Amino acid sequence: MLFQEIIKILDREDAKLAFLLCHHNADPDTICSAYAFKSLLKHFNPNLEVKIGAANGISRLSRNLLKHLPIELEMQPDIEKSDVIMLLDTNTIQQLNNLAEKLRNSEAPIIVIDHHAPHPQTEQIAELCITDEEVSSTCEIVYNFFKQTSVKLGKDEAKALFLGIVFDTRHFIIANSSTLKVAAELTDAGVNAKETLPLLSLPMDISERVARLKASGRAKLIRINEWIIAFSHVSAYQASAARAIIELGAHVTAVAGQKNENLGISLRSTREFYKKTNIHLGRDIARPLGEYLHGMGGGHSTAAGVNGTGNIKNGLKRCSWLLKKKLTDS
Ligand SMILES: [Mn+2]
């Protein structure tokens, strides 16, 4: 069993201190998996001191979770004295920012527990990589450790694992059957889903609400074939405004914002738009738009962004031209 391998390494090193490290801008999966894993390690090694370190800040959502779970995080982890170092949800040491150098120079064995494909460089420096790309999250891997070792989950540990899974599956949208079973088992272990789920939806700032509403009100619509395309602008929260406009019903949207001569444009589309037109916003729109605006553009198929120089009208006009061209070419 893979968990036993970890215990073996701890025993061999006669470890007194182990650090569990979370990736930069630590998300709920990385901090919650570290928290539950710490309990499991303590269960087998009560004398082992286990510390959780965040490499470079934690996300806003994670900060909110810290109010509801007794997770102790070190923001400036001093890993030099650590006998064993474990990385959770982290598949490259670059994700550890300023800790990367220390890790490279460290004599302590490194263990990786992750649900992303292992990076060759990481495999080189790690003594043990426990990676499983089939599972939803690192929390699910940690849950499986509990199950394999028949250790009963505490209420807070179960809640933490549940939150990590919910976060990484985008509220179960991309969960498969085994993940849903794990979620059900966690609710059997005492997690109140109804009370726990809202911890991952933060109330929106007033300024963000205003930005979304303004952008929606200003949206100029065009229609090409069956597609509704909305162009708008707002001085802040362009990405959030773009998501809002898609939720309201547009198939594609571009929301621009200007600060001095800098122009930023957020692009979003529905999955359906991408599937049917094969227009990849990052590659087909944001990239050429970024070049046109003497800046940079890129991103994913249905979410992309551009930063450059110019004015809103000109930037959106070019964006509209690129979309029309792509839509009529295909
Ligand atoms: Mn993850």
Image (cartoon, rainbow, N blue to C red):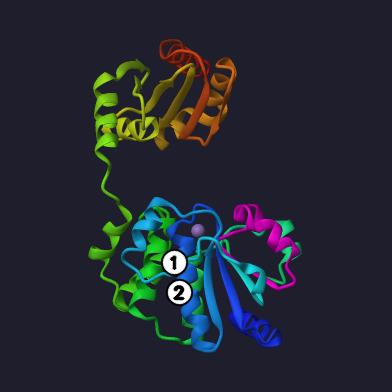
Q: Which residue is mark 1?
A: 32
Residue drawn at (45%, 86%), measured in percent from left and top?
151
Question: Residue 36 shows which numbered tag?
Answer: 2
Q: Position of residue 21 (x, y in %)?
A: 56, 65
Q: Position of residue 129 (x, y in %)?
A: 66, 68
* Residue 200 or residue 319, whichever sits in front: 200
**Ligand 1 within 8 angstroms of badge 1 C-beta:** no
Does any portion of residue 131 appear in the rendered image? no
Q: Quadrant of the N terminus?
A: bottom right
Does any portion of residue 237 appear in the rendered image? yes
Image marks 1 and 2: residues in contact by CB distance under 8 Å: yes
Residue drawn at (41%, 31%), measured in percent from left and top?
269
Residue drawn at (40%, 22%), measured in percent from left and top?
256
Q: Position of residue 259 (x, y in %)?
A: 43, 21
Q: Secondary structure at mark 2?
A: helix
Distance (Cα) linking label 1 and label 2: 6 Å
Question: Residue 45 shows which numbered tag?
Answer: none
Residue drawn at (42%, 66%), measured in percent from left and top?
179
Q: Is residue 198 left or right of residue 103?
A: left
Mark 1: amino acid? Cys
Mark 2: amino acid? Ala
The magenta region covers: 88-114
Q: Position of residue 324 (x, y in %)?
A: 46, 15
Q: Residues within 10 Å of mark 1 (few under 14, many from 20)?
A: many
Q: Is 201 rendered above or below residue 16?
A: above
Q: Secondary structure at mark 1?
A: helix
